[in-house]
Amino acid sequence: MTLSTWTELLTSPFMIRSLLVAICVGGSAPVIGTYLIQRRLALMGDGIGHVALTGVALGWLVGNAMNIAPDQLAVPGAIITSIIGAIFIEELREKSHTSRDIALALLFYGGIATGVLIIGLAGGTTANLTSYLFGSLASVSWQDVVIAALLALLIAAVGLGLYPALFSITYDDDFARSTGLPVGRLNYLIAVTAALTVATAMRVVGVLLVSAIMIVPVVIAQLYARSFYSTMLFGMFNGTILCVSGLIISYFHPVSPGATIVVTAIVVLIIGTVIAQLMQRNTLHKSSTNHA
């Protein structure tokens, strides 16, 4: 890789837009992911992502009907349906385990099936959904950059600005309720913020992989962070580095940016886990030796 290649990467309008979106996604997705992991809702992003696909298809359908470029309404459509799906999932969270599992399964598969059906009615094909399924930075516009930046700021404002209250309901709903916190409203706020995170990350990693960028950077951070808040901050750092690294790798090699980001994150997690285990064994060995 020559200096001219790196200069081209950093001066290309396409790469500048892509890098900005990648930074927005990498920095904001782990914020809500930290809360979801603690609440044992790591797969919530997957459920919302499947519903978001229906919103993308609806955007195409409405766009064709109004003679508007379908791509301009795809993200707004995904935001609306993602919020509806997130509220539905939060409602299910209070129900019995069996009914919740069945309903979530219907949501997962129904979201994709409905999206494929509607895109057909809109005159498109499943190929039109590919970029939203797996991510496509090639089609990122300045409008997408602005939307991603605004959503990322909103996600960070909620996750960091309301940290004390959200931390409280995440660890103990009953205690938070006894202190007078509006637990129900805050639970819905977390769900809606998760929906906005999915809509933000959709362009980078796609709806099928969106949950990974919300969760894996946080799991990596848990290997070395010492508190909930530091886990969130390190997760944001990890997510940003992973998204930018995956994007740069895909620039020099003809591979999917979304898949590259997720695979890179998983590889880093595996390596980090092995190192953490080796360090723990070494510490235990030294401790037993000293006692002996």
Image (tube, rainbow, N blue to C red):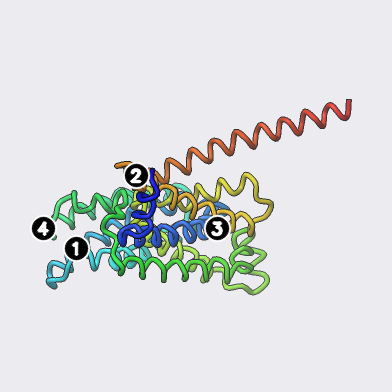
Q: Residue at x 44, y 47 (%)?
A: 98
Residue named by callout 2: 252
Tally of numbered tags: 4
Q: Secondary structure at mark 4?
A: loop
Between discs 4 and 2, the one toward the N terminus: 4
Q: Which label number is shown at residue 60? A: 1
Labels 1 and 4 touching (C-beta < 8 A):
no
Q: Which label number is shown at residue 123? A: 4
CA separation in Å, label 3 and label 4: 40 Å
CA separation in Å, label 2 and label 3: 35 Å
Q: Residue at x 13, y 55 (%)?
A: 124
> Residue type at mark 3?
Tyr
Q: Residue at x 64, y 64 (%)?
A: 168
Dot in front, 4 or 2:
2
Residue named by callout 3: 35
> Residue type at mark 4?
Gly
Between discs 2 and 1, the one toward the N terminus: 1
Spot occupied by residue 44 in the image (x, y as percentages of width and height)? 44, 53
Spot occupied by residue 277 in the image (x, y as percentages of width and height)? 65, 33
> Residue type at mark 1?
Trp
Dot in front, 2 or 3:
2
Left or right, 81 with respect to 270, comes to left
CA separation in Å, label 4 and label 2: 35 Å
